[in-house]
């Protein structure tokens, strides 16, 4: 993993945020369950697709929303990414700037890079 790859991921994730959240502000308040917004779900799906475009279709994606819903994946895969599309959903819903969008990359279970974005 190198900085070019991390930068490409961050750029794609920023694009996904603009497309999924900023372009559809209603997703901020539509609830899917008790603690999840439509923005959480849609942004995780968009970030997952973007990560596979950059890192390949064999990438194992472990999304916070999917794990919360009971889906699990192998963190010891050749390459895996952990995604939390909106960390701080309550702050996000309240339009407080204290939320973040995060990801971490793993190779065979070892952390190799990541980023925290403060949209």
Image (cartoon, rainbow, N blue to C red):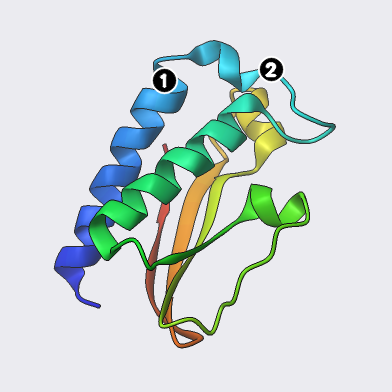
Label 1 packing within 10 angstroms: few (<14), some (14-19), many (20+): some
State the image coordinates of residue 97 (x, y, percent, origin top left). Answer: 53, 33
Q: Viewer-proximal residue, 93 or 79?
A: 79
Instruction: Give the mark toward the camera: 1 or 2.
Output: 2
- In the rendered structure, the answer to whether residue 97 lies left or right of residue 7 reads right
Q: Viewer-proximal residue, 13 or 61?
A: 61
State the image coordinates of residue 68 (x, y, percent, origin top left). Answer: 75, 52
In the image, residue 14 sits, relative to residue 4, either above or below, namely: above
What residue is disc 1 on?
22
Say if residue 118 shows up in the picture: no
| Circle on res. 70 | none
Q: Quadrant of residue 95?
A: top right
Q: Quadrant of the N terminus?
A: bottom left
Indicate the secondary structure of the residue bearing disc 2. loop
What residue is disc 2 on?
30
Callout 1–callout 2 Cβ contact below 8 Å: no
In the image, residue 57 sits, relative to residue 112, either above or below, namely: above
Mark 1 or 2, nearer chain start: 1
Q: Viewer-proximal residue, 77 or 24?
A: 77
In the image, residue 15 sits, relative to residue 49, either above or below, namely: above
Q: Viewer-proximal residue, 17 or 119?
A: 17
At 28% from the left edge and 64% from the top edge, which residue is drawn? Answer: 55
State the image coordinates of residue 14 (x, y, percent, origin top left). Answer: 32, 39
Indicate the secondary structure of the residue bearing disc 1. helix
- In the rendered structure, the answer to whether residue 1 lies left or right of residue 58 reads left
State the image coordinates of residue 82 (x, y, percent, origin top left). Answer: 52, 64
Say if residue 23 shows up in the picture: yes
């Amino acid at each position: 993993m190198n900085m070019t790859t991390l930068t490409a991921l961050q750029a794609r994730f920023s694009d996904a945020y603009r497309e999924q959240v900023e372009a559809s502000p209603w997703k901020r308040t539509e609830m899917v369950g008790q603690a999840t917004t439509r923005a959480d779900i849609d942004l995780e799906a968009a970030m997952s697709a973007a990560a596979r475009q950059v890192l390949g279709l064999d990438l194992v994606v472990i999304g916070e929303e999917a794990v919360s819903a009971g889906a699990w994946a192998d963190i010891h895969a050749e390459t895996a990414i952990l995604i939390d599309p909106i960390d701080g959903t309550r702050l996000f819903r309240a339009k407080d700037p204290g939320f973040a969008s995060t990801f971490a990359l793993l190779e065979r279970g070892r952390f190799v890079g990541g980023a925290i974005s403060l949209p």
